[in-house]
Image (tube, helix red, strand yellow):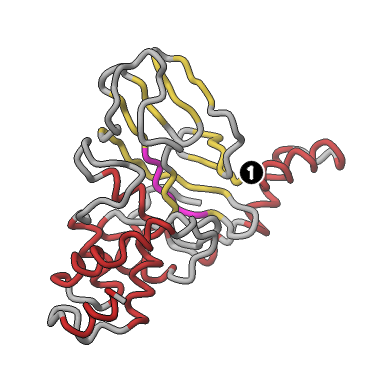
Amino acid sequence: MALFTALRRDPDLQGISFLQLMTFTRLLSPLKNDIILCQPITVSTTDPPAFLPPSIISFVSEATGVPSSAIPKCWALLKEEVWALPKPELSNDEELFRTYGWKVGISNCFLLAKASISLFPPMQECRNAYCARINAIKKSDCRQVVIYTLGSGVLPAWAVHLYCPDCNTSYRHNFSVQDGIRTYYGDTPTYIQIGEHQFSERRLVGLWVTSMLTAWVLAGSLLRLYNMALSQQQERDFAVGGWQFEL
């Protein structure tokens, strides 16, 4: 009811359609980690923050057609709904991320989207039992990587590393590193790091292992098979998004 009232009475929100608001919530839902990362360390990582980062405002304004001046009010009205949405698996807004998000460093994190993916650590706080830090980790490093998938070929992605300055622990998508010791998290992730800048989808790794064990397929043959039949390298130009890696 508050949303209907605001749309009717607030001059800044008049003229905004429900379709635009639905797109607004869909685009922001997979960007929760990006939104949290830009907040002060005192802001909760479990509740929606009061404000959006400027880059997020710019992106969602251009992608939805909602004036940037109205985005903070839309966020105030819809942030609880955005935060409650489950992580989506498939992207229907690929082109919006590609057109308006890449240029400001924003990519979607849908499971098998054909746009870029953001690979964050599974936590926002330091999990070192001997570290006294209680606030969220904000020091980060982003690097370009590629992901080999079974159904969507090779995808460009961002790998985000979080660094705890109190205990010098670096948290990555699959593992943490402290004093040169790598500690993997408990569950097998959807994307497994197989090189410094390369990840592979878990299902694809399973296919490779099964092919080797049951059909005696050589690793080199699997590589050629993937490049020729599954990589979809003819359909993508990574240079458009500024990616430094070739397929």
Front position in the image: 48 or 172: 48
Q: Is residue 53 left or right of residue 222?
A: left
Residue at image mark 1: 202
Q: Is residue 184 magenta?
A: no
Q: Is residue 220 left or right of residue 237?
A: right
Q: Is residue 156 magenta?
A: yes
Report whether residue 240 is seen.
Answer: no
Residue under the image location 23 percent in, 71 percent down: 61
Which image quadrant for residue 20?
Answer: bottom left
Is 38 drawn above or below residue 50 in the view shown? above
Report whether residue 115 is seen.
Answer: yes
Front position in the image: 216 or 11: 11
**Image label count:** 1
- The image shows residue 188 at horizontal and vertical percentages of 61, 36
Q: Residue furthest right?
A: 214
Front position in the image: 201 or 166: 166
Is 12 drawn above or below residue 136 in the view shown? below
Which three-letter amino acid code belongs to the residue tagged 1? Arg
